[in-house]
Amino acid sequence: MKDMTAMTMTQKILASHAGTKSVNAGDLILCNTDMVLGNDITSPFAIHEFSKIKGSGVFNKNKISLVMDHFVPNKDIKAAQQSKACREFACNEGISNFFDCGAMGVEHALLPEKGLVTAGDLVIGADSHTCTYGALGAFSTGVGSTDMAVAMSTGKVWFKVPSAIKFILKGQPGRWISGKDIILNIIGKIGVSGALYKSMEFTGQGLKNLTMSDRLCMANMAVEAGAKNGIFDADDSTLEFLKEAGAKKPAIFSADKDAVYEKVYEIDMGEIKPTVAFPHLPENAKTFDEFGEIKIDQVVIGSCTNGRLQDLIQAAEIMKGRHVAKWLRVIVIPATQKIYIQAMEMGLLKIFIEAGCAVSTPTCGPCLGGHMGILADGEKAVATTNRNFVGRMGHPGSEVYLAGPAVAAASSITGRITSPYELCK
Amino acid sequence: MAIKGKVFKYGNNVDTDVIIPARYLNTTDKKELASHCMEDIDKSFISRVKKGDIIVAGDNFGCGSSREHAPIAIKECGISLVIAKDFARIFYRNAINIGLPIIESKEAAMEIKDGDDVECDLEKGIITNHTGNKEYKITPFPAFIQKIIKAGGLVEAVNSGMINRNDGESDK
């Protein structure tokens, strides 16, 4: 028998895409990609670099996704020019997965929903939150525009094989606790560079108590701890989700029993309380016993982190029959057209609008201070998004507090950062 | 470009939102991006920076968004080198892919001060702080990455035959 190196989940997927039996942390490898993703901000640079590469055409028309979601519906003339460049490229190259205004959703909500990623895939995207698909048991990670250009041409991408940190999840999250509270708690523990260059692998008995929405939210924020990727063990919920989305046949990779992890954390999800990350880093996680009254000017419920149906249902449960606080703006953005329709049919949009919220077509807009909810100097916002850096949602003098949909909804009613348990038991 | 100039020193977790705020990402014009470089962390940076100057920072430089606009803006405004304790991984690969020299050195990142006159010889692997009268040895990049750097970036490396085209047959 050959002596094989014990591997993590991530290392196994990387090895399979590098055409080798095993890899070790630190190896530099060249991998085949199953999907290359870009958006209206990062693709224009990639298209420019692509034009400089010798050889003709893209490596595979079905393995590239272009999603116009950041400054779309186009916010200004320059943004319109960028979308136009993407549209022309997609048309000329015959890209099958081109999602424009009206069809698009926030990219990391859209690709899983459309079945464009399956377990065992290797996905790269010119967007840092591409790590979201780890929730499906895929290796997925963010890269830049040049990597995207080279991958569109060659189908390949270089990686340094990461070491890993293991998170063993136990227990049952409480009534108003979602994946967001859990991941903010974890980032608070390990810090914004706590998993730098590494994989975050999520496993354990508690997995069955996490919905796919919770997992997508948690994997989404792996990059906020500096991780290369976040990945979950695939289970029955994963397989059911992939089947419903019409994804191609999954390949399930499990970590070897003796795989090496640099650190192992046990997380009892039953002990996690509603959590808020204070400005200006996602690691500034606090629970409600750690701060006093903080008045806010705006709430944003949406994004690739928390714009899914489950998030809207949770927010609507709290907002139903109540009204948004005076002097507060609340913006609700379903992450995809499908979620928009579902929320409409379930009566959620009516609850939001009657409560005094603005409800928008899908866009990343406010999360990155692009459009659709920019903050003025000195303003504070609670957002279900993933970053609270200086100037992230607008003026460099504004502040973003990150939270899950339950905290965001409760805060919408009171006008200050509020625990859902204050309004609902 | 010669790597020699004055140091602009910053702290930990300098994120891509402060290097180039998203409100300026509606363009691919490198000069325009450069004109807003570091705007939300250091308003006077762009009026003070000169060709050859060097950025020195702490942990996790370039964290956050994958926007290649960040290393592009830094390179285009004349910065010849970024030294940090460590880099966020996407920024790290983006810098290499576009040919912006970066160096991880805990010692240099801690000791070099704002305004110091610093020079770097990448071939010899030495950073010299003329103000502080100190030299730092650089750990060389792995051979694979050196090839990308030598070619002048990833696209150039691909064009020189370093990465072969996938036949796209991996649909199985």
Image: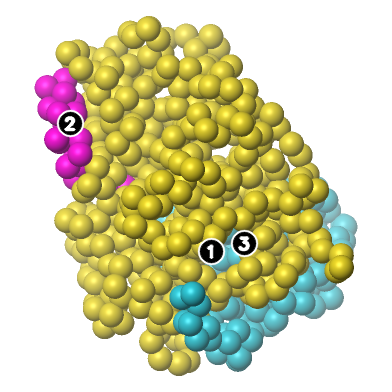
Q: Amino acid at mark 2?
A: Met
Which chain is in cyan here?
B
Residue at which label 2 appears: A346
Q: Residue at x 33, y 66 (%)?
A: A66
The answer for how far apart the CA atoms under marks 3 and 2 are is 39 Å
Residue at which label 3 appears: A13
Q: Residue at x 47, y 46 (%)?
A: A238
On the same chain: label 2 and label 1?
yes
The answer for how far apart the CA atoms under marks 3 and 1 are is 7 Å
Residue at which label 1 appears: A122
Residue A267 visible to an observer of this rendering = yes
Density class for disc 3 (Cα within 10 Å; few <14, some 14-19, many ≥20) is many
Q: Color of chain A here?
A: yellow
Q: Give the structural element (helix, strand or loop) at label 3.
A: helix
What stretch of residues is rendered in magenta?
Answer: A340-365
Q: Amino acid at mark 3?
A: Ile
Q: Amino acid at mark 1?
A: Leu
Quadrant hosting residue A205 = top right
Density class for disc 1 (Cα within 10 Å; few <14, some 14-19, many ≥20) is many
Give the mark, 3 or 2, whose residue is nearer the N terminus.
3
- Asked whether B2 or A213 is in front, the reply is A213
The answer for how far apart the CA atoms under marks 2 and 1 are is 35 Å
Is A358 inside the magenta-drawn segment?
Answer: yes
Q: Residue at x 38, y 20 (%)?
A: A407
- Asked whether B34 or B47 is in front, the reply is B34
Q: Please say if the residues under marks 3 and 1 sit with CB atoms less than 8 Å apart.
A: yes
Quadrant hosting residue A374 = top left
